[in-house]
Image: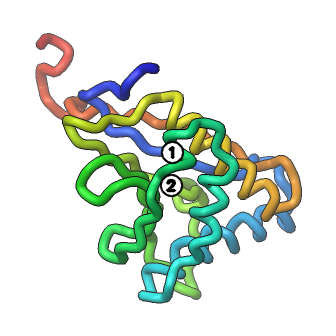
Amino acid sequence: MTTLLDNYTHRLRFYIDDLSDKKHFNKFKKLKKHIEMSFSSNENFNDSILSDIKKHCILESNKNLNIIKEITCGPGLGEINNKSLRFRVNLWDKDYYYTGIYNSIIIDVYQSDNNKWTYEELNDIMRSFTIIATDYVNKEVVRGSIELLDNNACNEDYLWE
């Protein structure tokens, strides 16, 4: 299994196809709002989504992840201050409609020097959440991706190191 590249920040992004009809797009937005609002407003997060992610995983390492209920960083799976996945919190305003990146559900990836994720594990989590979101939307229009963000991209000479 291949561990994550150290010089990149990783995250999982879930989005709906651009060509989806309004009905399915609105269902996806409702799922996103449910995930984000349930913990940004100090309500108890619906553990069933996290339990379902574990249930749909193939890898035993993912099936055995702990559910994290800590509100400050958002709910997720893994171990606090070690190897964890956390749903990103966006503060919703009922009068504001998100576009672009804000129409995505994002899971941030955290790891320690001693306990690292593998791409196989992230792909398994991505597959699992895509199944859950597809069931919720009731059509196969949800896509997932693993994004890599270069930690050194803003350094003037990062290409020459």
Q: Earlier in the sequence, mark 2 or mark 1?
A: 1
Left or right, 109 with respect to 14, comes to left
Total marks placed: 2
Q: What's the amino acid at mark 1?
A: Leu
The kind of secondary structure element at disc 1 is strand
Location of residue 122 in the rendering, given as x and y in whole percent from the top left corner? 51, 38
The residue located at (72%, 52%) in the rendering is 16
Contact between marks 2 and 1 (CB within 8 A): the answer is yes
Left or right, 62 with respect to 142, comes to left
Mark 2 crowdedness (10 Å alpha carbons): few <14, some 14-19, many ≥20: many
Q: What's the amino acid at mark 2?
A: Ile
Q: Which residue is mark 1?
A: 12
The residue located at (57%, 34%) in the rendering is 123
Q: Which residue occupies the foreground of this view, 138 or 100?
A: 138
The kind of secondary structure element at disc 2 is strand
Left or right, 28 with respect to 141, comes to left
The label shown at residue 115 is none
In the depicted structure, whether residue 148 falls above or below residue 18: above
Q: Is residue 101 visible?
A: yes
Mark 1 crowdedness (10 Å alpha carbons): few <14, some 14-19, many ≥20: many
Location of residue 10 in the rendering, given as x and y in whole percent from the top left corner? 39, 39
Q: Which residue is mark 2?
A: 106
Location of residue 157 in the rendering, given as x and y in whole percent from the top left corner? 12, 20
